[in-house]
Amino acid sequence: MLKLFKKYSVVIRFIAIFLGSYFMLSFLYNSYLIYSEGKTDYYPDVVTNLVSKQSVAIIEFLGYTSKLEPHPYEKSVKVSIEGKYLVRVVEGCNSVSVIILFLSFVLSFFTKLKTTFFYILGGSVLIYAMNLIRIALLTIGIYEYPQYSSFLHEIVFPLIIYGTVIILWIFWVRVYANLERNEKEV
């Protein structure tokens, strides 16, 4: 059994760190959501509210008149262009869950503290920014091409956010492998 454990120790380490950090960060995030429920002036929560406002700022930067308003029946923010209600931004749209997934993977291949920290920081900012652009373009896409709204929402725009994460993961594994190789050569 010990021999088997040693043989797969790298895989076991990866799984343990990934799952441990993912569940711990998800627990903390869910605790934040429960705590913030009804405790702030920001609806539905601070991060989702901020993402909604920043996405509308991008929409307006691109030349459209846009408006935000709280959804009357659910925890979300309604986004309108030119007075037409198009999308709602819910907690799942704020990129925090995707950033937690990204962060857990990077921690599973932890290397030097400074390198790992700055990669997580830079990757998280990139994912957050791509998400803002994704929401803005999705809203504009649904406004301009309503017949493609399902295709845009269910295929194109998840591909953008998860594609960004996968590219960051691939890049991190290459950086990690190079750092590991260089440390062994020294």
Image (tube, rainbow, N blue to C red):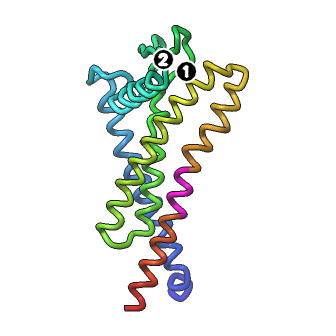
Depth check: give the residue in front, 49 or 20. 49
Q: Residue visible at 30% across and 29% down?
A: 36
List the single residue furthest toward the right: 147
Q: Main secondary structure of the magenta part?
A: helix
- For marks 1 and 2 on the same chain, the one whose residue lies earlier in the sequence: 2
Contact flag, marks 1 and 2 (Cβ < 8 Å): yes
Disc assigned to residue 87 = 1
Q: Residue visible at 37% across and 72% down?
A: 111
Circle 1 residues within 10 Å: few <14, some 14–19, many ≥20: many
21 on left or right of 147? left
List the single residue furthest toward the bottom: 186
Stretch of the chain drawn in magenta: 164-170
Depth check: give the residue in front, 5 or 95. 95
Amino acid tagged 1 = Val
Q: Which residue is mark 2?
A: 78
Q: Residue visible at 42% across and 78% down?
A: 179
State how far apart marks 1 and 2 are (Cα): 6 Å
Q: Position of residue 164 (x, y in %)?
A: 54, 50
